[in-house]
Amino acid sequence: MKKLFGLAVFLIASSVTTVTTLNAAPANRTAPEIATPSWTGFYFGGDVGGLSQHTHAISDFFQTDSVHLLPELEHNNPENHSPNITSAIGGIHAGFNWQFAPSWVIGIEGDWQPKHLRDTFCRQTDIQSQPCVASGRGFATVGDETGLIGTARARFGWAFERTMIYGTGGAAFANVKTSLGVNCPNGCADSSNAITTAIEASSHKTGWVTGAGIERMFGQNWIVRAEYLHVRLGSASHTLFLPATNCFSGPCGLTASHDISYDIVRAGVSYKFGGF
């Protein structure tokens, strides 16, 4: 993703040098006056790039178990899981800019990135089981999936002729699904009763986003960009309770909690309505 962002910035910077060279007039001639473009107006476009998901998750198969001899192992068996998942991403954006005083630009923008980013891992039910092995006391699974990511942001930039550098920040939204499952064909917790069960919970998460980018205007209406965004959406927690027939003397089951954050690097193109 860093290479993609660097390539986009290089292309924009190269275009600035090329246009400046082509527009330079010989010393003995008067250069024709070229109208300075305005960034004011509505625009719409698309973008592609890469997304990296950073997740810190902790899960626990909790129980009151008469089999264990050590009291500190009777109730909890927490495990940490921190995957870093990278994937391609693409979507659309739209917004409005207003240029003033005379090189500053403020604006608003919204974007929508459909995405199915999924991570699933196996874990023990307790110290007598093995991850992903359906024997003995079985195993548990924890998964999360991001369905889409959207943002609504303010932008503040500094424009010099056809190039603008800007910072951006605002609200972020995502549809996040969490799945919890237990597979114990020979019984788990403190029971010999076989059980295979799972739940899936979907939630709409709201958080914040911040970032920065650079844009270059071509002709009267076309704009290319390179942009970086950091998104944080808080955390999600869910619990799968097993039936009482699978528990010893109190509730037992699987619980999981994970935080949600993304880094997005992308390049895009926009069409600005209206001319100079």
Image (tube, grey):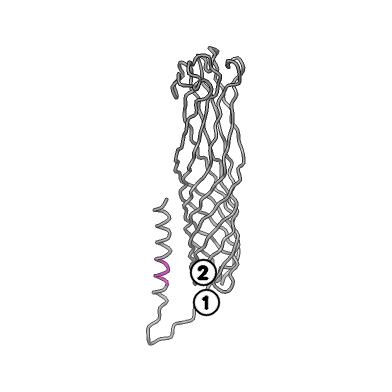
Location of residue 110 in the rendering, given as x and y in whole percent from the top left corner: 59, 54
30 displayed left or right of 74 = left
**Element type at marker 1?**
loop
Foreground mark, 1 or 2, reads: 2
How many numbered discs, if any? 2
Image quarter for residue 148? top right
Q: Amino acid at mark 2?
A: Ala
Query: Can you say whether 53 is above or below 6 in the image?
Result: above
Mark 1 or 2, nearer chain start: 1
Q: Which mark is residue 159?
A: 2
The dot on residue 35 is: 1
Give the residue at the far front of this rendering: 71
**Mark 1 touching mark 2, by CB under 8 A?**
no
Q: Name the amino acid type tagged 1.
A: Ala
Quarter that holds the C terminus? bottom right
By secondary structure, the bulk of the magenta-drawn segment is best described as helix
Secondary structure beneath label 2: strand
Q: Is residue 163 above or below residue 153?
A: below
Q: Which region shows up in magenta?
A: 14-19
Q: Position of residue 94 (x, y in %)?
A: 58, 57
> Looking at the picture, does residue 119 appear above or below residue 194?
below
Magenta span has 235?
Answer: no
Q: Residue furthest bottom?
A: 28
Q: Nearer the viewer, residue 252 or 135?
A: 252
Q: Quadrant of residue 43?
A: bottom right
Res 155 → quadrant: bottom right
Q: Position of residue 229 (x, y in %)?
A: 51, 53
